[in-house]
Image (cartoon, rainbow, N blue to C red):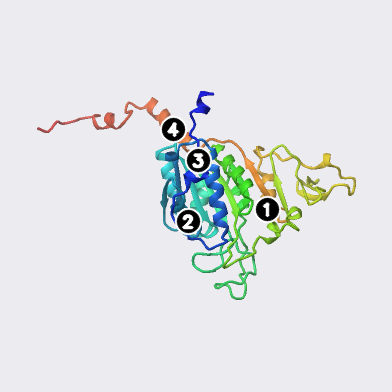
Amino acid sequence: MAATENKPKYTFKDFQSGQRVRWCPGCGDSAILRAVQMAFAKMGIPKEKFVVVSGIGCSSRFPYYMATYGIHGIHGRAAALATGIKLSNPELSVWQITGDGDGLAIGGNHFIHEIRRNVDVNVLLFNNRIYGLTKGQYSPTSPKGMKTKTSPYGTIEEPFNPGELAIGAGATFFARGIDANVNLNIELFLAAQAHKGISIVELLQNCVIFNNGAYKSLTDKKVKDDNVLIVKHGEPMIFGKNKDKGIIVDDRGKIKVVTIGENGITEKDILVHDAHEEDPLIHYQLAALKHPVVMGVIRDVRKETYCEALERQMKEVQQKSPIKNVHDLLYSGNTWEVK
């Protein structure tokens, strides 16, 4: 009880820097910013222990708007900065802000290896499927055939699915939210902070200038319930305006969308979500599913983090070696005293 009482009490306003927010009016980044500030206020972590790191892009202005420590890095290199910060001080809560261009194009190599290493960093990947800051070129997540300034006849490239990429690289935590659902995003950020290891949160985000309406089918009140499945650990994967649709696993081990009440399907047949299952197969399929789009915490498993492995290795080496620290190293072997 005493530990709980000693936790700092904040409101979202305590995490507002006072800087003028320069995103376009209506940009989904603003809603995500508010959700992050509200989530930070609920974590009970002292403000001085938060660090927000970014690369280049519209989303990467984030550190300016947070009343925390922060670094606005260079294009695609936020992962390197975040990793170094976490290793130098594991007690810090490190939040990496990146976009589908910054994180998956020039920073793609850093992204997959940060995941592979399981660095205890929280990565928020803003996915608007376009380059917004540089005025509307197609990005690694732009749909095939999309016409942009750099693909006037339609891009011929297959897009990345960040969830497939993250889980394929070995992510121990993957979640997906959307800018308009602030309450869901707060839940995801709290879960990401609680997770020990790499946390990847993909945030579907609308760019009102260069890709407006990219996620309209997921936000329009008339159709969103039939197009979005929000998963929660331990609960059956049921969705739809009438709560009559669900997910099952067929004889081939593949997930399948069914309608409850048809072909003898009942609620008991619907798959119960297990975010903690170590085998990534179902998680990968959920992340890849296009209809419905799956949101919520899709994967959350515990494995040794990079910081834990490094600390363990150092202790093992220290036990075997006569040199325990820098002082021992400097005074080992032949030494001379200069007067």
The numbered mark, 4 or 3, whose residue comes first in the sequence reads: 3
Q: Where is residue 134 in the image (x, y as percent from the top left)?
A: 49, 67
Mark 4 Cα-neighbour bin, 10 Å: few <14, some 14–19, many ≥20: few
Q: What distance separates the C-alpha of mark 4 from that of mark 1?
A: 35 Å
Q: What distance separates the C-alpha of mark 2 from that of mark 1?
A: 26 Å
Q: What is the count of numbered marks? A: 4
The residue to which callout 1 is attached is 288
Viewer-side label of 2, 3 = 2
The residue to which callout 4 is attached is 311
Q: Which amino acid does label 4 sit on?
A: Glu
Q: Which amino acid does label 3 sit on?
A: Asp
Mark 3 Cα-neighbour bin, 10 Å: few <14, some 14–19, many ≥20: many
Q: Which of 333 and 111 is in front in this view?
A: 111
Q: Is mark 2 on a helix, strand or loop?
A: helix
Q: What distance separates the C-alpha of mark 4 from that of mark 2?
A: 31 Å
At horizontal 57% and vertical 40% (from top left) the residue drawn is 190
Q: Which amino acid does label 2 sit on?
A: Ser
The residue to which callout 2 is attached is 60
The numbered mark, 3 or 1, whose residue comes first in the sequence reads: 3
Q: What distance separates the C-alpha of mark 3 from that of mark 1?
A: 24 Å
The numbered mark, 2 or 1, whose residue comes first in the sequence reads: 2
Q: Is mark 1 on a helix, strand or loop?
A: helix
The numbered mark, 4 or 2, whose residue comes first in the sequence reads: 2
The numbered mark, 2 or 3, whose residue comes first in the sequence reads: 2
The residue to which callout 3 is attached is 120
Q: What distance separates the C-alpha of mark 4 from that of mark 3?
A: 13 Å
